[in-house]
Image (cartoon, rainbow, N blue to C red):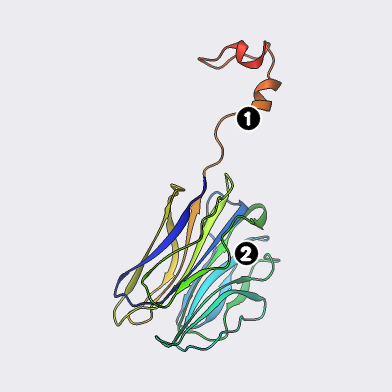
Amino acid sequence: MAGTVTATQGGSVQNGLLLRVMVLTQAAATQNGATLTGAAGGGNIVTTQTGSRVYGATLRAAATANTADSGCTLLDDVQDATHVADYSTWKTTALTGTPGSTLVGCAAGAGVAALEVLTAGTLTEDGSAPTPGSSTTTATTLTSGSFTPPAGSLVVALVSSDGAGSVTTMTVSDTGLGLTWTEKVKQNPAGSGYQGVWTAPVPAAAGLLPQQLRARTPAQVAAPGESLAMYGR
């Protein structure tokens, strides 16, 4: 089923927002990987699993393009001259090798939030995700393009947002997908906007596929309410 993701500022709001939505397959069912926050563009995160990947967002208090730290790749970088800000999202360029302390993020910034996304196989970025990221310099809410994530995947929302003089909060929701969103990490001290990473698991497909039903034999006991006629017998 197709749907969109929306990020909405709360608290002390100010126009300016970047939202990047990622769709990952073979992600772990429980996402409790390492996190990083700080009043800088990046920092050292202590990864915990071989094959994981770190995703994050950075806010810079200058309308100047940012540069990813070594070992990271920028996903989006948006300059906001009106509010003198730069919004960035990024990822580690490769999957985690030997876990341990790793420099991640951008070369400059006033705030960063990052999450190590854990894997249950080979963590893969699915092509269903809406790209590029969505951005605005004239609003406090932002909606992604429409997309259809595969069953069993993990949807990740990276948010970098401006804010006013007090604490800026964020809400992430979707329309059409019916997912449950969790704010995994955030950086939002007073006057420093908001940077955060949210996740939402897509339910696995329920029930047996038709070909699986056909493969069953009369010798197999039918489940309650079933008939062997269902299997062509």
Question: Is 153 or 144 nearer to us in this picture?
Answer: 144
Number of callouts in the render?
Answer: 2
Q: Is residue 2 left or right of residue 49?
A: left
* Image quadrant in which you'd find residue 194: bottom left
Instruction: Tell me how far mark 1 sits from mark 2, CA to CA.
Output: 32 Å
Question: Amino acid type of disc 1?
Answer: Leu
Residue 128 lies, in percent from the top left, at 60, 55
Residue 53 lies, in percent from the top left, at 62, 64
Question: Amino acid type of disc 2?
Answer: Arg
Q: Which mark is residue 209?
A: 1
Looking at the image, which residue is at 68% across and 19% down? 216
Q: Which mark is residue 149?
A: none
Question: Is 183 or 161 nearer to us in this picture?
Answer: 161
- Tell me, yes or no, whether the two marked residues, 1 and 2, touch with CB atoms within 8 Å: no
Looking at the image, which residue is at 55% across and 15% down? 226
Q: Nearer the viewer, mark 1 or mark 2?
A: 1
Q: Which mark is residue 53?
A: 2
| Badge 1 element | loop
